[in-house]
Amino acid sequence: MISIAAPTISADAQERVRDVLESGMIADGETVRTFEAEFASLCETSHGVATSNGTTAIEATLRGFGIGEGDTVLTTPFSFVATANAIRLAGAEPVFADIDPETYTLDPDAAREVANETDVDAILTVHLYGLPSEMDDLVDLAEDLDVPLIEDAAQAHGAASDGRRVGSIGDAACFSFYPTKNMTTGEGGMVTTDREDVSERIRSFINHGRQAGGGGYEHAALGTNYRMTNVAAAIGLSQLERLPDFTERRRTNADRLTAGLRDVPGVTPPVEPDGMRHVYHQYTVRTADRDALASHLEAEGVGSGIYYPTAIHEQPAYDHVTHSAPVAERAAAEVLSLPVHPGVDDADVDHILEVIEDYAA
């Protein structure tokens, strides 16, 4: 079976973990600080703050900007539910704007329409599947509203828009290092920003409200434990070195899939708009009879995934939300992701294409 995801942990990562274990300093510490600095360098930002996972990274970032009870955060309804959950965990409420039908990312025009009708205290956009959002228009909207623009870059490590690295375009960005992501720490997250004040508030919040750099028992504000461990950071440092190779393999696989699917009827491949650098966390096609294609793929030894089968505003946990997002709702009924990860080789790509061509014939 060609799996939809296959994280790889190298011998180098295992050695780094052994070094941490042997040091006895297995919780938060200098290995985390090194990982923060190197990841911030990747994103071309001044600050990186490592967290326990991508969800806590978003919640901590919102709190770092003072977003909380009574506030509203404009976001997309087409993402993993953690995007919206983190808003609610911070005490705020999400308001949803529809997505672009080709990129699946937040539609800036729809976002502006919602902002014209609703008081908005922050914007949280998602670089879905590894493709950056339309950041220029969203930056303009955030400036017009005088609110922070936060990037949910959980799926977009190393992606870029007009030469600018994802993670450095908005006021802050949040990453996930879950095992299926483009790079992993096992579990983990990261916040990148050029705002020193925001980074200090985030660092305090994830460390029980201690002042940044504090390790004693002075707690200046309410906080919790969302820290990353040195063990996770050791894996992350090794993965970060491999990320360029991971990305090139994903992009090569994606280019070959797109070339092969271009003339296949009933299957629409993803787009990479001019100026965007897609890093293909997922290679997502559209098809009207998704279940039939998925079943055919599985029967021929090809895994697939649906990201996501239900728009967030239609989830049971969001029954209180009255909203319509027809583009997102249609995407949720039609999207199907194919294997594109670095473990997929040329022969695998050929087989995937042959199976889909056979299905469409």
Image (tube, rainbow, N blue to C red):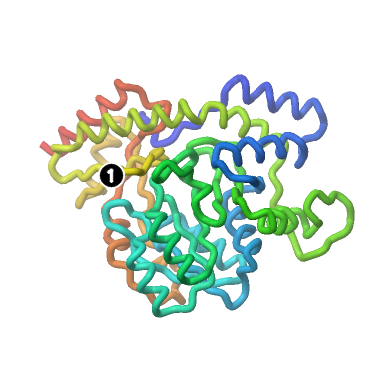
Residue at x-position 78% and y-position 53%: 212
At 41% across and 32% down in the image, what residue appears?
Answer: 341
| Disc 1 element | loop
Where 181 falls versus 234 (above or below)?
below
Q: Is residue 288 visible?
A: yes
Residue at x-position 63% and y-position 31%: 237
Q: Quadrant of the C terminus?
A: top left
Identity, as a three-letter code, of the amino acid under mark 1: Val
Horizontal placement of 204 versus 102: left or right? Answer: right
Check the image and report above or below for 249 versus 193.
Answer: above
Q: Dividing the picture into quarters, in which one does residue 184 lie?
A: top right
Q: In front: 162, or 91?
A: 162
- Asked whether, in this view, residue 172 is left or right of residue 272, the answer is right
Q: Nearer the viewer, residue 84 or 32?
A: 32
User: Does 126 sit left or right of 45 as displayed?
Assistant: left
Please tell me how crowded label 1 is: few (under 14), some (14-19), or many (20+) other residues with Cα within 10 Å.
Answer: some
> Percent from the top left, x then y, of residue 72?
52, 73
* Residue at the spot 49% in from the left edge and 61% down from the top edge: 124
Residue 24: percent from the left, percent from the top?
A: 82, 31
Say which residue label 1 marks. 271
Residue at the far right: name it: 217
Residue 129 in sight: no
Q: Position of residue 56 (x, y in %)?
A: 62, 54
101, 134: nearer the viewer: 134
Q: Quadrant of the N terminus?
A: top left
Q: Position of residue 189 (x, y in %)?
A: 60, 46
